[in-house]
Image: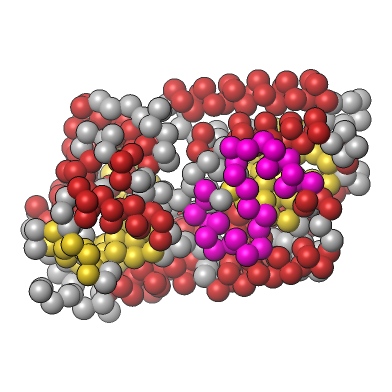
Amino acid sequence: MSRLIIISNRVSAPKDSHSGAQGGLAVALSAALRENGGIWFGWSGETIDQFNGHIHFQQGGGVTTAMVDLEEQDVDEYYNGYANRTLWPLFHYRIDLAEYERGFAGGYQRVNDRFADTVRPLVQPSDVIWIQDYHMFPLGQSLRERGCDNRIGFFLHIPWPPRRLLGALPEAAELVRTLFAYDVIGFHTQEWLDSFCDYAIDDLGAQLDGDVLTLDGRQLQVMAAPIGIDTTEFVAASKSPTARLAYRRMRDSAVGRDLIVGVDRLDYSKGLEERFLGYERFLQEHPEERKEVFLLQIAPPSRGAVESYRKIRATLEGLSGRINGAYADVDWVPIRYVNQGYPRDQLAGIYRAARIGLVTPLRDGMNLVAKEYVAAQDPADPGVLILSRFAGAAAQLEGGAVLINPYSAEEMSDAIVQALKMDRDERIARWRTMMDNVEGEDVIWWRKKFTDALMAPAKVDA
Ligand code: GDG
């Protein structure tokens, strides 16, 4: 069996899996590494005066991790710059927030080359390499330039933007060309996959035959593989003593009111501003429902070094303050807005206590919170998932979720009313439909779908 080399910006060691924001993904990738043997490589999160390529190896939970430190300038240009100020907004259709600076693009390439230099000596001829996410688009190409002819796959965790939007990126053509260094590329949904193929075909002249794109003699297998959660683990988490306690605490503090819950990294792509406005509309239009519900929004801050993240934080503080100021009473506050993270088990208990899961990103590669909310429900009395039609998860959960356009405050308000009035039979039927998917297409299924394609014998050249 081939060893697996997983490369991602940050490495989530298995011990983090109950607290880290990458829970399910860390669990799945660690399991793959335990089965196949191999190494998980990435940035340590630390900075150093002068890059030295020194690798910090760690062993834990049957997994070997290997990490390097980067220079401060690397972090500014590669991580805070190109990855999070250029690619992230553009790939989430926020062309207005995307910043283009040559220094960012140069730093991004430099760091990818540094990763390639560092990881190359670790790679054995029979290893299979699996690279994760938008921080590392050119890494496959950098490895090829260093003589690496192993099977290399790439999985994108965020959306792929429509062809015309991608055209706003000065390096778009070059970036897509470098992706042909991979053998397999995966996306969460057919929509993201189609957008990628559109660009490769219409702008670069690639040809599609079945699931293989060909450009300048290089073949690239493309696939849609929607990521899932570790459902068995999450269901167990929702029944753990910590979850039960969190559930009780929520129910007690709700004093008979219905809880609506949102859990998101504090990110403009998650549609938090629009969510607050939709909820405000609901409060305005339904005075009779007002004191029957409250919204708990958990939003741990992220990427605070980037200006647009500081702005969204300030906007949300203003909005929640305004809404609470306008509607709160001595014994009721409409929004509980919390800027901290909670342990996974506690989160599972909170989901279970919530009558409505409000997941309304403006654009999201997949969205695992939607699936976690479903997995945590009580099968005999489940809550309702209100889900943005612009989340990748909508393609899988549309049969059971109440789908909305998150830009429409009216749709959000109507959906909240619909969910509050929904009878138990309908809630159970909808939940069952979603749970079938969450159980069937879990993170282990996802990982296997991708690694099966990646580990398949190399294609014969046409
Ligand atoms: C990217 C893509 C894609 C959040 N708050 C707490 C906490 N979380 C956990 C959630 C969930 C994870 O963070 C967030 O996952 P998402 O999928 O919602 O979003 P991104 O971080 O943007 O992830 C996304 C994903 O990659 C995987 O491919 O689905 O579309 O953007 O697991 O539970 N976890 C804990 N406490 C918190 O307070 N423990």
Residue 46, magenta (yes or no) = no
Residue 442 position in % (x across, y down): 52, 68
Q: Is residue 92 above or below residue 316?
A: below
Q: Relative to residue 104, is residue 390 drawn left or right?
A: right
Q: Is residue 391 above or below residue 291?
A: below
Residue 94: x and y in percent read 42, 34
| Image quarter hosting the C terminus | bottom left
Instruction: Give the residue drawn at x 49%, y 47%.
Output: 364
Where's the N terminus, which quadrant?
bottom left
Image position, residue 429 (x, y; %): 74, 69
Relative depth, front residue between 64 and 151: 151
Rendered image quadrant of residue 83: top left
As for residue 409 lying within the magenta part, the answer is yes
Q: Nearer the viewer, residue 168 or 377?
A: 168
Span shown in magenta? 390-417
Percent of width and height locating residue 443: 49, 66
